Image: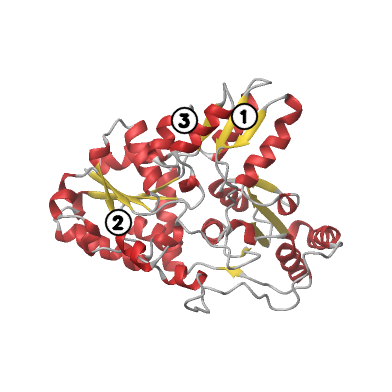
């Protein structure tokens, strides 16, 4: 895309985008690319044996969490698998584990640190494993947004609801301002609770989950929703638009789920007669509206477990999980394909590979703590408050 095209489409290059394009450098964004010590070669034939040996040496001192979107080579060493919140809660339920090795992304490791005890240390095998969605809402941007809502005279009627896929700073902001956290499984309950507390919701940072839940589950209209763009003055909205809206959606999205399109759904239906389209609610609204079933990662897994033999499914979520499910259910005659023709992994999730896991486990086995994720106490307190409100949802 040329600069002229970007301007025409109102695309503002971020520092991270410029870094990826090789036009700027930011050492802080590149942390974790190089590990202290020797990172094993990906071609080392002994990687699996080394990981097993290090994990066995650590014994009960280590608890390895594996998110559903991780590579198979990493998942095989996970003590438990699941979505981000389930894994953080599993870690908190294992107080005897001194080290929590989180094979996921940065915000997930932060959540684990918030929910575990002070004696437990959370390790992220590669510090560069971030989340593009979480990075789309910074603490400074959200504070500025709240100022805009205050100037519009509505802040006292707005309840923030933040998706689990957000940084600890955003969770803390939510806690400070009387809001709650939600997952893709309980977003409807979280929004119902929020509208009992106030008249409007500021939904962070995924606009699609917020819109889909409001329209599909709560019966609102698309006109009830406005999108706050942090890269525009006043979010690109007038005070009148903010006052009229029920849902103020942050302009963020998942780089994987955002790729699926209505054309993807139409194409797979034409190619595979009788196919069931099952998508994650982080997908665009038109994709969700065209799908047969919509649900969280755990919902997707359970739906396929319950599906009859011989059924056909097109799944709109991350490719590592879709491939794993396709292989798992192939013996039952269930045909499972990726919704889009274009292969799309979560690139940051895939930074956690076997060499990084081996390096982290061997370092811990040798008594060296590496890549610890630690949330400061004030941020932790307010973030935990927001998480506790979620846990108390009816």
In the image, what residue occupies the spot 19% across and 50% down? 242
Apparent side of residue 52 relative to residue 223 in the rendered image (left or right): right
Q: Can residue 393 be seen in this view?
A: no
Q: Nearer the viewer, mark 1 or mark 3?
A: 3
Decide which of tag 3 and tag 2 comes sooner along the chain. Answer: 2
In the image, 122 versus 166, the foreground residue is 166
C-alpha separation, residue under disc 3 versus residue under disc 2: 35 Å
In the image, what residue occupies the spot 46% across and 67% down? 17
* Image spot of residue 86 (x, y percent): 57, 45
Is residue 86 depicted above or below 379 in this figure? Answer: above
Marking on residue 177: 2
| Residue bearing mark 1 | 304
Mark 1–mark 3 contact, CB under 8 Å? no
Decide which of tag 1 and tag 3 comes sooner along the chain. Answer: 3
* Image spot of residue 311 (x, y percent): 63, 22
- Is disc 3 placed on a helix, strand or loop? loop
């Amino acid at each position: 895309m040329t600069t002229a095209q970007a301007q025409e489409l109102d695309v503002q290059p971020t520092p991270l985008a410029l870094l990826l394009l090789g036009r700027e450098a930011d050492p802080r964004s590149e942390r974790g690319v190089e590990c202290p010590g020797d990172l094993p070669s990906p071609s080392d034939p002994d990687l699996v044996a080394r990981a097993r040996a290090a994990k066995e040496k650590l014994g009960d001192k280590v608890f390895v969490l594996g998110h559903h979107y991780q590579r198979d080579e990493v998942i095989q060493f996970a003590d438990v698998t699941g979505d981000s919140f389930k894994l953080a809660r599993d870690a908190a339920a294992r107080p005897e584990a001194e080290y929590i090795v989180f094979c996921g992304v940065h915000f997930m490791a932060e959540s684990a640190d918030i929910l575990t005890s002070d004696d437990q240390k959370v390790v992220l095998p590669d510090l560069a494993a971030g989340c593009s969605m979480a990075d789309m809402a910074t603490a400074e941007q959200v504070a500025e947004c709240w100022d805009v809502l205050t100037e519009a005279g509505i802040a006292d009627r707005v309840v923030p609801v933040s998706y689990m896929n957000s940084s600890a700073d955003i969770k803390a902001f939510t806690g400070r301002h009387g809001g709650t956290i939600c997952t893709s499984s309980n977003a409807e309950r979280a929004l119902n609770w929020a509208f009992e507390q106030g008249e409007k919701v500021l939904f962070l940072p995924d606009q699609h989950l917020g819109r889909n839940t409001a329209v599909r589950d709560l019966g609102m209209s698309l006109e009830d929703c406005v999108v706050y763009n942090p890269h525009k003055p006043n979010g690109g909205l007038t005070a009148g638009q903010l006052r009229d809206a029920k849902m103020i959606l942050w302009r963020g999205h998942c780089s994987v789920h955002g790729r699926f399109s209505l054309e993807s759904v139409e194409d797979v239906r034409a190619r595979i007669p009788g196919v069931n389209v099952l998508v994650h609610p982080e997908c665009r609204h038109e994709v969700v509206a065209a799908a047969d079933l919509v649900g969280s990662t755990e919902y997707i897994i359970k739906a396929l477990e319950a599906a009859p033999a011989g059924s056909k499914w097109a799944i709109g979520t991350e490719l590592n999980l879709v491939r794993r499910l396709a292989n798992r259910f192939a013996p039952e005659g269930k045909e499972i394909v990726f919704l889009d023709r274009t292969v799309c992994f979560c690139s940051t999730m895939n930074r956690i590979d076997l060499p990084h896991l081996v390096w982290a486990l061997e370092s811990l086995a040798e008594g060296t703590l590496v890549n610890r994720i630690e949330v400061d106490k004030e941020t932790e307190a307010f973030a935990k408050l927001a998480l506790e409100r979620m846990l108390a949802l009816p």
